[in-house]
Structure formats: structure tokens, C-alpha cells
Amino acid sequence: MPIRSGPCPTLETERLILRPFRDEDVDDYFGVLDTSEVRRWLHLPAGLNRSNAWQQMAVFLGEWALRGTGQWALEERSSGAFLGRAGLYRPEYPDWPGVEVGWTLHPDHWGRGYATEAGAEAIRYAFEDLDLDRIYSCILPENEASQAVAVRLGMELLEERTMDFFPSAPHGIWSRAR
Ligand SMILES: CC(C)(COP(=O)(O)OP(=O)(O)OC[C@H]1O[C@@H](n2cnc3c(N)ncnc32)[C@H](O)[C@@H]1OP(=O)(O)O)[C@@H](O)C(=O)NCCC(=O)NCCS
């Protein structure tokens, strides 16, 4: 039976494929989340497990179906390696600024410009295909690697504010207009 991936498009950049998550990605995706670096920077709960990784994948695909935004699974074109995820996120939080562009890679693939390359394509898609006027990123002030990606993508820090989903600290609200 063919598996329909729904409204998440597949896009290509110079070095990356941005594609819908597939059921069989669960071990690779949990492998990304289950690194000490990613657990630390995303403040993931200690008990986060493989089932939770699968639930996240289902939410990513669900957001594409419900809202036309969502995360892509990232593959390295040259090797087919699963790198992590990047994409557009608009959760149902009343104090969320808008459509966010975000990125999370396995630490084995940091330091190669892949997050910036994927983020640039996500922003291009947001502005050209979704016709959005503005894009946001919510980044904790101590997350310098993520802020550096935002800066490389031409984003500016608008403000810092505490949001309901993470009450213990303010997030930087980064943004770029079309
Ligand atoms: C945030 C995160 C995705 C950034 O990854 P990253 O690899 O540092 O970012 P990029 O992919 O843009 O790579 C940039 C680095 O690659 C280097 N690089 C090497 N080859 C490159 C190339 N061909 N093109 C561009 N940059 C290249 C850059 O010089 C830069 O190095 P530097 O960090 O020493 O300055 C990563 O740290 C991560 O997954 N963190 C955990 C999850 C997280 O915090 N997500 C964001 C929540 S807000």
C-alpha cells in the first residue's frame, strides 16, 4: 500500500534533501534527540523516549496537514544520511509570535553549515511559496549556536520575553521580514 506523505513538499538544496518524515525515521530521529547535546539545548525531559520521538514525527506531519507548515526531515544528498530536522513551526500557543523557522541536527553533523542551508530554504519556502511577510525564531539567550544560525540567516533580535510553554526563562524573539 503506498504511503501518502500529504502536504509536506520535498525540496532540495545544494547539499540537502528536505523531505517529509517517514515511519522508518523513528530510530534515526530518536538518535538525534537522545544525544546529550540535543537533550541539553532543547531542554528535553530526561524520560523522553523513542515513543515520544515518534509522537513528535506524527505532530510534524499533522502540522503540515492542518496548517501547511511543519518540519522536514533532513538528509545529506551525498550519503543519504539522516541529519535531523528543520522547518516551520506554528503551534497552538496564544503567545507564540508567528511562523517560526527552527533547526536541530545530530551533533555529528554540526559545524558544516547544514542548519543554515536548511533554514535558508525553509525561509525561502515561507516567503515565496506560503507568501508570509515575516518569520520568527524563538531562541534561549544562552543558545549561541542557534543564535548564530539566525544571524547568518539575516534575522534580528526583536525582544526577549517569557512564553507560557517555557515559564522558567525568557526566549529571544528573532525575526526577519520578507
Ligand atoms: C543549532 C544547531 C542546529 C546549529 O548547528 P551548526 O552546525 O552550528 O550550524 P550551521 O549548520 O549553520 O553550521 C555553522 C558552522 O559550520 C561551519 N561551516 C563549515 N562548512 C561550511 C559550509 N560549507 N557552509 C557554511 N558553514 C560551514 C561554519 O563556519 C560554522 O562554524 P562555527 O560554528 O565554528 O562558526 C545545532 O547546534 C543544534 O542542533 N543544536 C541543538 C538543538 C538546538 O538548539 N536547536 C535550536 C533551538 S532554538
Image (tube, rainbow, N blue to C red):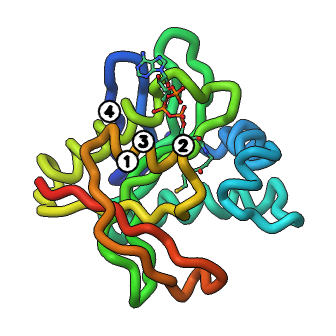
Q: Which mark is residue 116?
A: none
- Rendering quarter of residue 11: top left
Dividing the image into 4 quarters, which one contains the N terminus?
Answer: top right
| Residue bearing the label numbered 2 | 145
The residue depicted at 22 percent of the width and 52 percent of the height is: 126
> Pointers 1 and 4 in contact (CB under 8 A)?
no
Instruction: Give the spatial CA distance, label 4 vs label 2.
Output: 24 Å
- Determine the secondary structure under disc 4: strand
Q: Is mark 3 within 8 Å of ligand 1?
A: yes
As shown in the figure, which amino acid type bears the numbered disc 4?
Leu
| Residue bearing the label numbered 3 | 149
- Determine the secondary structure under disc 1: helix
N-terminal of the two: label 4 or label 2? 4
N-terminal of the two: label 1 or label 2? 2
With respect to residue 99, does 103 lie above or below? Answer: above
| Residue bearing the label numbered 1 | 150
- Check disc 4: other Cα within 10 Å, few if <14, some if 14-19, many if 20+: some
Instruction: Give the spatial CA distance, label 1 vs label 4.
Output: 21 Å
Instruction: Give the spatial CA distance, label 1 vs label 2.
Output: 9 Å
Depth check, mark 3 against mark 4: the one in front is: 3
Q: Is residue 49 left or right of residue 116?
A: right
Q: Is mark 4 within 8 Å of ligand 1?
A: no
- Check disc 2: other Cα within 10 Å, few if <14, some if 14-19, many if 20+: few
> Pointers 3 and 1 in contact (CB under 8 A)?
yes
Q: Position of residue 97 (x, y in %)?
A: 33, 76
Q: Which mark is residue 11?
A: 4
